[in-house]
Structures are given as structure tokens and as C-alpha cells.
Amino acid sequence: MIPVTILTGFLGSGKTTLLKRILNDQYGMKIAVIENEFGEKNIDNKILVQETNEQIIQMSNGCICCTIRGDLARALEDLAERKKAGTLNFDHVVIETTGLANPGPVAQTFFMDNTIADEFLLDAIVTLVDAKHADHQLDEHEVVQRQVGFADRLFITKSDLVAAAALDARKHRLVHMNPRAVIEVVNFGDADIKEIFDLRGFNLNSKLEIDPGFPGGRRSRPLHLRPRSQPRP
Ligand SMILES: [Zn+2]
């Protein structure tokens, strides 16, 4: 079974910074990356591709949480086949979603498709949260709430941009939203690699708790930037 990490987080939360660091010092791990950059203009992605072109699959024709979920499944199957054939060598897959994606439907891919379920193990959903903008983003975007709710591990990034009291308040809010996830504060992608991989943190039961429709239910539909029509109660 090939372990897979879903790396998620809203726009500007530092996913690419973290991923770049992971790829730069891989600690002996060989990592294949599936990047979905639909809707994000991210110049850092170009650098990634130049440095490690063989292991990066870019999916930019749509969003992997909804419009191109079939493409994601095929990309994973292709990776597994190439690994078996010995034409590609990797130990782990990272799926970097767009900032606008709901990780729920992406995670479903690993349970609904038998071929993929046989080959891959969803290791964890890792979600990055921007310390400075998280409150506003959580208020405004349901998809950010989903990203936090589905997380097995939460990294609070850009913590140097907020005061200690504000950082505590963010942590407090995240703990209430997702008491199961381990929460860590990181700066500039400076997270311990052991805190990212091989967490074996994905717990289907906990996902069913937060979303009874998971997987495949009505409530686990993809969510995108939808401004809340009602103010928070
Ligand atoms: Zn989507």
C-alpha cells in the first residue's frame, strides 16, 4: 500500500512553501506529488516542476474535488502502475489541493474506487491554516471550515504575523472545530517531516461523525468559494 497525504489549506496558507521544503530535503523519502493548481496562480509551482519534474503531476484542467475527480483516480492508477513496472520510484504520494477545494471528496477517492483502495492508503489529511487571516476565512468560506474539519493534523502558519494572544485564540477556535486533529504552529514551512508523513491519522469514523454523508453522500458535495448568505449566528 502506498501512503498518501492530502495537503490542503486556503489560499495563502503556505502549502507550496511547505511542499517545496519537503521536496528539497526529502529525508531519504521519494515523494510523488499531484498538484492541482486550478484557480491558483502560483509561480512557485513552476520552480517545483523544474527541480523534480519526473515526480510531479500537474492537474490544471479543473478541480480535483469535483470536476476532475476521475482524472485524479486515473493519475493515481498510473502512478501505481509505473511504480509496479519500475519506471517510477516513490514511497509516498502528496496531493496538493487548490486552496478552494474541499478535501472530503478527494479523500473519498480512496474509499470509493476499488483499484485505488487496493493500492493506496490514505495516511492523513494535513491542513494549513493562516494565523493572520484564519478567523476571517473561517467566517466567510464554508470550504475552509471543511478543510479544518477534515484535517487529521492542523498546522498554523504565519504565526509570526500575529500576537501571542491572537494565536491562542486561533488555536482555541480550531480545537473547538476539530478536537481530533493535532494542532501545531509552524513558520515558513518549517515543520518536522515526521509530523507530516506516516501519521496513519486518517480515521474514517471521525469523518462520518463530521459528515454523515461521507463518502458519496449529498452533504459531502464539493464546496467552493461561496460567501455566506447569512451572518454567523
Ligand atoms: Zn472542487
Image: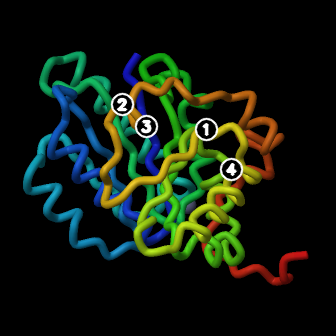
Looking at the picture, which amino acid does disc 3 mark? Thr
Please report whichever mark, 2 or 1, sits nearer to the chain's N-terminal start: 1
Q: Quick one: SS at disc 3?
A: strand
Q: Is residue 138 above or below residue 59?
A: below
Q: Neighbour class for label 3 at 10 Å: few (<14), some, many (≥20)?
A: many
Please report whichever mark, 2 or 4, sits nearer to the chain's N-terminal start: 4
Q: Position of residue 9 (x, y in %)?
A: 50, 59
Q: Which residue is mark 4?
A: 149
Residue 22 placement, left or right of 223: left
Q: Which residue is mark 2?
A: 194
Q: Neighbour class for label 1 at 10 Å: few (<14), some, many (≥20)?
A: some
- Gap in angstroms between the C-alphas marked 4 and 1: 15 Å
- Gap in angstroms between the C-alphas marked 2 and 1: 25 Å
- In the rendered image, which quarter contains the C terminus? bottom right
Q: Which residue is mark 3?
A: 5
Q: Which mark is residue 181?
A: none
